[in-house]
Amino acid sequence: MKARDFIGKSLVLGLISFVWSVPGVTAQNLQKGTYGYLYCHMSDLGEFTAYALSRDGLNYHDLNEGKAVMDPEQLALIEGGQRDAYVCRKSDSGKGYLMVTTDMCVRKSKQWFNYGINLLKSDDLIHWTSTTFDFRKGNEIFCDPESPDVIADWSKINRVWAPQIFWDPNHVWPDGDKGGYLIYYSIWSSNEGDGYDRMVYSYADKSFTKLTKPRILFDWGYATIDADINYLESDGKYHMLIKKEGGHPGIFHTKSDHLLGPWPEPDEDDFVDFEGKKKCEGSSAFQIPGEKGWRVGYIQYSDRPKHYRICQADEHLSNFHDPVDIQGVTGPQHGSFMRLTKKEYKRLEKHFNGK
């Protein structure tokens, strides 16, 4: 598929998206708890999900000695590896938790290609069930098989990377039910002839077991991966951190009035600039209650050893400054942060560390 055909199809899919997402209540993920923080991350020691806890959002300690908190062989059924873990609360009911991971194991495949993602859910952050979506199977894995395709030949997919979750109460399903989880991620198929990763999105239902076909979120004409979307009360807009791999590469910031865009190209001056020419990715923004600004975690992977850093940003998720290395975590890598209640914090500490 040529780039111009891909962009034309993007416009059609964008109109479809508009039909099924109507204005209303602000879309945002449920936040709860001021006692502590969970850092849920891929481990740099292996392709599995690990946990660390913190009381202040900056100084952490491992759970389960930094080892896997779930079995990737049982929950990532394509390659048996979990990367890029993103965790959040279940927003439709206010009870339970959700996670998405990249189903990928470079240790086994010896390549930077993969074929799908995992949608997980839990009642306690300890015991998880998973639904795996192998994109090579095409229409049969999606709940809307008659919708247009953004990939001409699903069997030749090359990458499905770094999914994240955003609750959208305004999404309307064909049966009239309202509310769905926006799953946004990057996708690439070399068979399409365009040569770069694009940001797409699907919707997952409230059971977190069904997924719509991907549609284009934006296409800037070069590779973009590792998007992180947050709704900011400071200006009532949706803000995105994104890794650009074209143009001036790095972690950049852009914003939109609407969750599904349009998402304009970032200001070339609004990026994580203090790492110089060192490569960074996997950003995850979170707030510490009582602070106006934001904290942004990311991995700087040019150095050996790598550095997982947390920097500060202003109330508009811009003007990045004062990076510090995360403390107390074994093998920190691409992950996400979630605030915890005291009950949740103590439950995880007791289960994994016996305290």
Image (tube, helix red, strand yellow):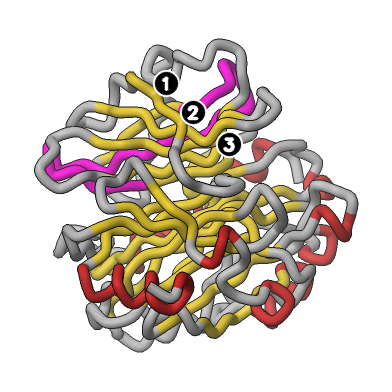
Check residue 251 in the rendering and tell me which mark sits there, or answer none: 2
Q: Secondary structure at mark 3?
A: strand
Labels in figure, total? 3
The three-letter code of the residue at mark 3 reads Thr
Query: Residue 60, relative to residue 27: is it above or below?
Result: above
Name which residue lies at 26% across and 78% down: 92
Name which residue lies at 49% across and 28% down: 251
Query: Residue 332, relative to residue 98: is it above or below?
Result: above
- Label located before the other in sequence (1 or 2): 2
The reply to whether residue 1 is visible in this rendering is: yes
Instruction: Tell me which corner region of the image, top left, top right, bottom left or bottom right, holds residue 69.
Output: bottom right
The three-letter code of the residue at mark 2 reads Ile
Q: In the rendered image, which residue does mark 1 sit on? A: 271
Name which residue lies at 37% across and 79% down: 173
Q: Is residue 346 left or right of residue 139?
A: left
Query: Residue 326, relative to residue 302: is it above or below?
Result: below
Q: Is residue 355 left or right of residue 335?
A: left
Instruction: Tell me which corner region of the image, top left, top right, bottom left or bottom right, holds residue 196.
Output: top right
Give residue 32's position: percent from left, percent from top.
19, 65
In-front residue for pair 172/58: 58
Q: Is residue 334 left or right of residue 203?
A: right
Q: In the rendered image, which residue does mark 3 sit on? A: 224
Q: Are marks 1 and 2 in contact (CB under 8 Å)?
A: yes
Give residue 4's position: percent from left, percent from top.
65, 37
